[in-house]
Image: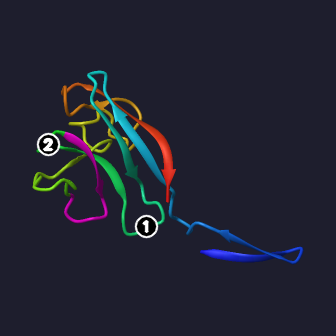
Amino acid sequence: MVFLYLVDGTIIAAQLQTPGVAMGQVYSAACECGYQVGDLFLGRGEAVEADWHPAFCAEGQHVVAVNRAGEPLACPKPRHIATPILYGLDRRLSPVESGELGGRHLCPRCRTVRLSFEEVGLWD
């Protein structure tokens, strides 16, 4: 939503985010074994019909962003038909099911709980 204000004879535009819609976050993930993935666009941004969350694709052995608002959950990579497992929400991947990405998680490469996520930016 954009609002126009008149300040000292000058029109100023201000864009406000829709209430209830959080800005999206950009994350990277890395493990001590060397596995890395960057530019995971998570959250909603201004798209109310999507809710992106990191997930483990067992078929491709990688971390991907999946739309939790979409049915069914699916890996965005072609021909990966296994249902991705959400990080932070499943004890098979995250020892603490908090819905948060802090702490350590299962690495798709070395299969140890040493993968960590780091916020590196914002998107909307």
C-beta proximity under 8 Å, tags 2 and 1: no
**Label drawn at residue 58:** 2
Occupied quadrant, residue 74: bottom left
**Label drawn at residue 47:** 1
Occupied quadrant, residue 14: bottom right
Q: Residue furthest top?
A: 32
Q: Secondary structure at mark 1?
A: loop
6 left or right of 19 in image: right
Seen in the picture, residue 113 relative to 38 is either above or below; the reply is above
16 left or right of 55 in image: right
Give whichever of discs 2 and 1 has the lower sequence position: 1
How crowded pointer 2 is (Cα within 10 Å; few <14, some 14-19, many 20+) is rated as some
Question: What amino acid type should be assigned to the residue bearing mark 2?
Answer: Ala
Q: Which residue is painted at 18% across and 28% down in the image?
A: 111
The x and y percentages for residue 23 are 51, 57
Seen in the picture, residue 49 relative to 34 is either above or below; the reply is below
How crowded pointer 1 is (Cα within 10 Å; few <14, some 14-19, many 20+) is rated as some
Distance (Cα) linking label 2 and label 1: 27 Å
Occupied quadrant, residue 29: top left
Judge by depth and name the residue closer to the eye, 9 or 50.
9
Q: Which residue is painted at 89% across and 74% down in the image?
A: 8
Q: Secondary structure at mark 2?
A: loop
The x and y percentages for residue 120 are 48, 40
Question: What amino acid type should be assigned to the residue bearing mark 1?
Answer: Ala
Q: Residue furthest front?
A: 10
Q: Which residue is painted at 26% across and 22% down in the image?
A: 33
Q: Which residue is painted at 14% across and 42% down in the image?
A: 58
Q: Which residues are magenta?
A: 62-73
